[in-house]
Amino acid sequence: MSKAKKADRNVLIYRSVIAVLIVIFIVIFVYGLNKVLAMEGTLPPITNEEGLTSAPVTADDGVNFLKRVYALAQESKPKATREDTFSVDGDSIDTGENERLKKMFAFVSGGFEKKLEDSFEDIETDFGESFPDGITLPDFSQADVIPQTYYLCENCGMTSDEAKDKCDECGIETPYTESSRNIKCRYIYYSCRSCGERSDIQKPECEVCGCVYPYNEKYADEYEVTLKLDSESVPEYFSPVGKERIKEILADEIKDRFEIRDIDITYNDVHVYYKVRRMTDELTYLELFRNMTVTAQLEFAPHYNTGETSVTFNITEKNKQSFTWPGIELSSHEMSVEPKATDNLLATLTCTDPTEPVVTWTSSDESVLTVDEEGYIKAGKEAGFATVTASFEFNGKEYSDSCKVNVRYSVESMKLNKRKANLSPGDTLTLKAMPQPSKASVKTVKWYSEDPEIARVDENGTVTAVSKGKTSVYALSDDGYYKSSCEVNVK
């Protein structure tokens, strides 16, 4: 064979190999793309359960709700603690132009804070004990509640306690709008349906993981309620820290340099903040927050012989009451297992001695699954549903928690019989959703159209073209929430 022919043959082989590799690459790419499109992701449904008591929306609601849940706590006698904390705002110290005096007061403020806190003993009760005098509900009424000022971004709905010229969330350079409300109740938040990233506002897509679907609205486990009180009409609620106590402790802290001639206190901000479990109305936290401005008229000690001066500073006082309720919580409240598979649940107890109570485990249907004394689950041969319950007795009362278990062959992917469709207004097309594998226990789906004004879809997957445009019709599997779409072009 001549060298020329041999060279031509090598070139031909080389080109053939390249062509085959290109074809293989294209096939793999297309297959992979279709696979990705067929498994566009999981979209967990919004399952927000309303609380035992509706969220308070007025000042009357907030006050009455707090009184009711506090009465429940007094009757049920959970474990309770009380702690008083005080902090001096160093930036608020004002001594006029006397910088040396300002530095001196900044130096002694730490000791002043500690002496204030040490003057109040922490209180703790055990389960079943009545609350002592130090753990009590502040004596205020709806008439003491005043509006709270806040600031709102009109573009994205972000709120702030301070006025802003630019929104930190959406970046719009428009000043926040000043607004007011009689009560602040937080329990609604938004989360990315893919990675779970949380936000106070609903976002159209996730900047963290890149998910292109809007955040889901979620309900937190607790209501967080804030009531702002009229500082002029509010009595000394939680602790008797007032003019005389502050004067006494401050005088002791600066006695080597000054004598206090007079002292004045102005309350700037007084509010009550509390947290309640939505599903049980159990009070878990109660705090009285007070911010006050102290102005002290001082006279230098005789050996200084420099006359009089004054100092002004802000103190924040927090009286914090925490409540721990006996109970049991499982590591999961919904789970799925394959037939014949095993899994386990963990139970966490909150009581005086969590190792002493005996936890009893039961299955609502032992033909579907069984559970042993340590929470290990063994699924049967057939698909089905059962509820696993863990319970224990404490102080004469039974506490329990449950987990719904679905024994099934899981959906692992889903595809539609069509990825694209061209229709004219009035045309119909029936799409078929095919969850995989074929032995999956739950094959039902729900159908959605991203723009029903272009094309709508019914519960059977029948698409009806409405008007010109492009939209996406997709199915969402009831098991696993896998999504698969068909691009509909209405010409």
Image (cartoon, rainbow, N blue to C red):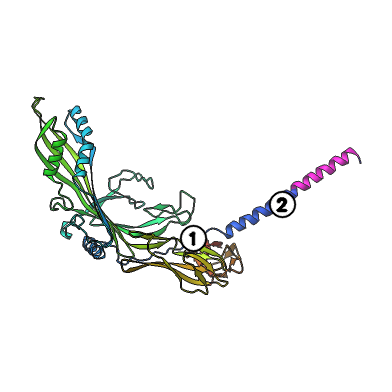
Q: Quick one: label 1, few (<14), some, or many (20+) residues within 10 Å? A: some
Sequence order check, earlier mark of 1 and 2: 2
Q: Residue at x 63, y 55 (%)?
A: 32
Q: Is residue 7 magenta?
A: yes
Residues in magenta, as a range? 2-18
Is 97 drawn above or below residue 353 in the view shown?
A: above
How far across and down, in percent of the image, does residue 63 sit? 21, 61
User: Based on the displayed image, in which of its 4 quarters is residue 91 positioned?
Assistant: top left
Is 458 drawn above or below residue 91 in the view shown?
A: below
**Residue at disc 1, secondary structure:** loop
How far across and down, in percent of the image, does residue 315 sit? 20, 42
Numbered circle sitting on residue 193? none
Q: Residue at x 42, y 64 (%)?
A: 47
Q: Nearer the viewer, residue 397 or 60?
A: 397
Q: Quick one: label 2, few (<14), some, or many (20+) residues within 10 Å? A: few
Residue highlighted by disc 2 = 23
Residue type at mark 1: give it.
Leu
For the stretch drawn in magenta, the main secondary structure is helix
Q: Residue at x 49, y 50 (%)?
A: 209
Residue type at mark 2: give it.
Val
**Residue at disc 2, secondary structure:** helix
Distance between mark 1 and mark 2 Cα atoms: 34 Å
Q: Is residue 336 magenta?
A: no
Q: Nearer the viewer, residue 398 or 193?
A: 398
Quadrant where the image shows the N terminus: top right
Residue highlighted by disc 1 = 43
Is 84 drawn above or below residue 45 in the view shown?
A: above
Q: Is residue 414 left or right of residue 454?
A: right
